[in-house]
Image (spheres, rainbow, N blue to C red):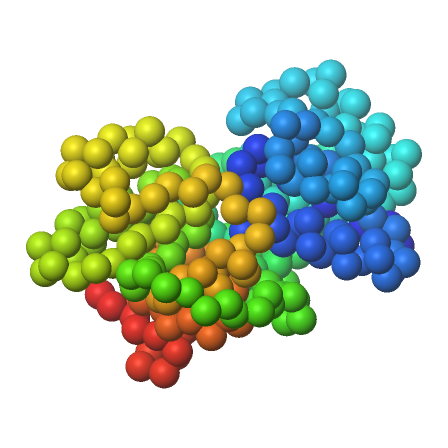
Amino acid sequence: MGKIGFFNTAQAWGGGEKWHFEISRHLHRNGHEVFVFAHKNSVLSRKLNAAKIPNEAITVNNLSFLNPWLRSKITAIFQNHGFQALVINLSRDLKLAGPCAKKAGIPRIIYRRGSAIPIKDSLLNRYYFKAIVTNILANSQATKKTINANNPHLFPEDRIKVIYNGIQMDKVPPLKPRLGPLTLGNLGRLEHQKNQGFLVGLATELKKRHLDVKINIGGEGRLRDELQKSIAENDLEKEIELLGFIETPLAFMQACDVFVLPSLWEGFGYVLAEAALCKKPIVAFDVSSNPELVRHGKTGYLVP
């Protein structure tokens, strides 16, 4: 197979970072040579170090691809590693690492697309997807459909491969008897896409109906303060709790009765697979890839 590089400079922890960590760890444990580039202050970097997966800390921004010194440095690093394939995560990573990988002579430059939103039909994107990227890895059929949505000729469809995110099925913690109110769970980054503000309205409506329900929200993000303020303004401190970053998502799922996902879009909802693995009923919006994970009326409900 040859040495495989992974390039993911996201600082926040999400599905893409979980995928990069678990895939690199799996390959590393099975004797394959891997190396990961990650943001120095990220959860991904911390987990890579704890798992003793070879990695290097790097910090980039949206304009880093304009820095000739950084491009030269990364090209030299790629050449020294002798990668046979490089898997790139973010669009900003593609702009920087993609041309460096091509200049370094890496045979396969793989863009992993993890978000089911259309790619912009820009001059830069047309260049990268024509001249740099050799393959695209999509995490769902919904994600695949969005790649060429704005330009049917952006990238050859036969070089887009859908591989669903894997999930380890022997790690489910035992279910313990639990007393208390019906508990709804939500897990994800506190960002616009994940739409946790919807849960404030949900809690308000349930409270009006005099239903004894608790909503636990796991995750961190830029909207934490805004959500906390909204919870206080609606007098929902007893009904909603922000639990912060969750190290053990399956244990979190086991503490819920129903999993609720109000995301506006998903590439592949890891949390839906984890909730299903824990045999929790799911309520989610009928958007993007959710119908690929939830069997409506059987494993959960997909709503408009």
Number of numbered discs present? 0
Residue 288 in sight from this viewpoint = no
Residue 296, given in percent of the width and then of the height, sits at 33, 78
Q: Is residue 24 left or right of residue 253?
A: right
The image quadrant of residue 46 is: top right
Of residue 57 and residue 253, the one placed in the foreground of this image is 253
In the figure, is residue 100 to the left or right of 76? left
Image quadrant where residue 8 sits: top right
Image coordinates for residue 183, horizontal then vertical, percent:
33, 60
Q: Position of residue 121 (x, y in %)?
A: 43, 44
Going 88% across and 51% down the picture, which residue do you hit? Answer: 33
Q: Nearer the viewer, residue 156 or 288?
A: 288
Above/below status of 265 relative to 291: above
Which residue is depicted at the point 15% across and 50% down? 204
Above or below for 186 versus 189: below
Q: Residue at x 65, y 66 (%)?
A: 171
Q: Quadrant of the C terminus?
A: bottom left
Quarter residue 47 falls in: top right
Q: Nearer the viewer, residue 151 or 37?
A: 37
Q: Quadrant location of the N terminus?
A: bottom right
Q: Is residue 241 visible?
A: yes
Name the side, left or right, on which 100 lies relative to 249.
right
Q: Give the residue drawn at x 53%, y 36%.
A: 12
Which residue is the extreme one toward the bottom? Answer: 298
